[in-house]
Amino acid sequence: MKWLQGRVLENRHWTDALFSIRVETPPLAFEAGQFVRIALEEDLARPFSFVNPPQDPVLEFYGIVVPEGPLSPRLARLQAGERLLVATNPAGFLVLSEVPEAKTLWLVSTGTGIAPFLSILRSEALWRRFRDVVLVHAVRHRRELVYQDIIRKHLVRYLTFVSRESAPGSLAGRIPAAILDGRLEQAAGLALDTDAHVMLCGNPEMLRDAAAALAQRGLRKHRRRIPGHITVESFW
Ligand SMILES: Cc1cc2nc3c(=O)[nH]c(=O)nc-3n(C[C@H](O)[C@H](O)[C@H](O)COP(=O)(O)OP(=O)(O)OC[C@H]3O[C@@H](n4cnc5c(N)ncnc54)[C@H](O)[C@@H]3O)c2cc1C
Ligand SMILES: NC(=O)c1ccc[n+]([C@@H]2O[C@H](COP(=O)([O-])OP(=O)(O)OC[C@H]3O[C@@H](n4cnc5c(N)ncnc54)[C@H](OP(=O)(O)O)[C@@H]3O)[C@@H](O)[C@H]2O)c1
């Protein structure tokens, strides 16, 4: 694999566990929603989604410390001026160019799974192509509802779930249950039907259970050869 030498400009800590790294690298082309492998040493690399839109020359990654994980605790400790390797081959299909025609686009995430949607949210094609855009972010605690400044600048319907404490203004519980019982649609004021396309990102169990709940509404996985309504990206 080929690597770009990056220099960390900032490592912002939202909580003890959540961090956002901004890194300067030579130019790197990608499509909003894609990911790239990052590393401190070449033999320990992990994929991370771009948070920044492609037109922004400074790359940004949003991460969480998995305490027993080999890389994320070290990324969280990175400081301005330190080196971060960024692979030269961004990849991934969680991108608008793979999404077929739809009236409403739902961007549905848990935890750090919001990262690619922050890039997509700032891409021009989004506002040309869809009548409504709904961003859904589920976290354990209120303080994990990050990037509010960027989100609130856009005309997106922004719905949040906080699952482990009470949080006025946020839905309680989990995304799949709220699809099944209609709470998600009610909160958005929009239908989850076959006029919608749903992009799901984050916890693999949420992806599986949400896709099963959506199947009950007639939505099915999108494939290039057999167009559908659901695109997924699992973070582990
Ligand atoms: C396509 C893709 C894109 C990704 N984009 C991001 C991103 O933008 N931000 C990010 O933080 N991570 C992202 N990840 C996960 C990331 O690559 C690492 O797995 C993560 O940073 C933990 O690395 P680690 O070496 O410490 O532990 P690992 O050995 O990689 O993971 C150990 C365990 O930690 C848990 N875990 C891993 N990632 C997460 C996570 N993000 N949130 C909660 N639990 C997790 C899982 O149970 C996993 O089995 C992405 C993964 C994939 C496949
Ligand atoms: N978040 C923290 O406070 C924190 C702090 C330090 C380290 N970490 C580490 O980070 C990792 C977890 O990260 P995270 O909290 O961002 O991710 P997460 O466990 O995936 O939780 C994020 C959101 O997804 C929901 N969720 C979990 N499983 C689901 C499922 N099967 N279906 C639908 N929704 C589901 C959670 O609800 P529930 O609450 O109902 O599970 C929560 O609202 C762990 O390795 C942990 O050790 C987390």
Image (cartoon, rainbow, N blue to C red):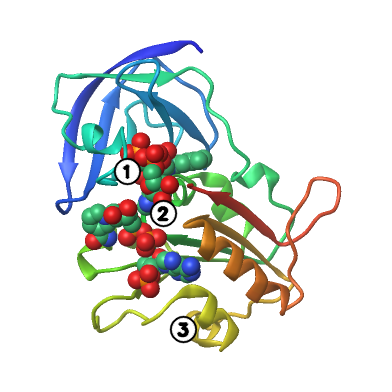
Given residues 52 and 223, the one toward you in this image is 223
Residue 27 % position (x, y): 42, 17
Q: Residues within 10 Å of mark 1 (few under 14, many from 20)?
A: many
Mark drawn on residue 62: 1
Q: Nearer the viewer, mark 3 or mark 1?
A: 1
Residue 119 % position (x, y): 44, 44
How far, Cα to Cα, is label 2 from label 3?
Answer: 19 Å
Amino acid type for the residue under numbered disc 1: Tyr
- Outermost residue, front side: 68
SS state under label 2: helix
Q: Nearer the viewer, mark 2 or mark 3?
A: 2
Please, is residue 109 above or below residue 168 in the view? above
Please, is residue 235 above or below residue 45 in the view? below
Please, is residue 154 above or below residue 225 in the view? below
Q: Residues within 10 Å of mark 3 (few under 14, many from 20)?
A: some
- State the residue at coordinates (48%, 47%): 235
Q: Are marks 3 and 1 in contact (CB under 8 Å)?
A: no
Residue located beneath label 3 in the image: 187
How far, Cα to Cα, is label 1 from label 2?
Answer: 9 Å
Q: Are marks 1 and 2 in contact (CB under 8 Å)?
A: yes
Mark drawn on residue 114: 2
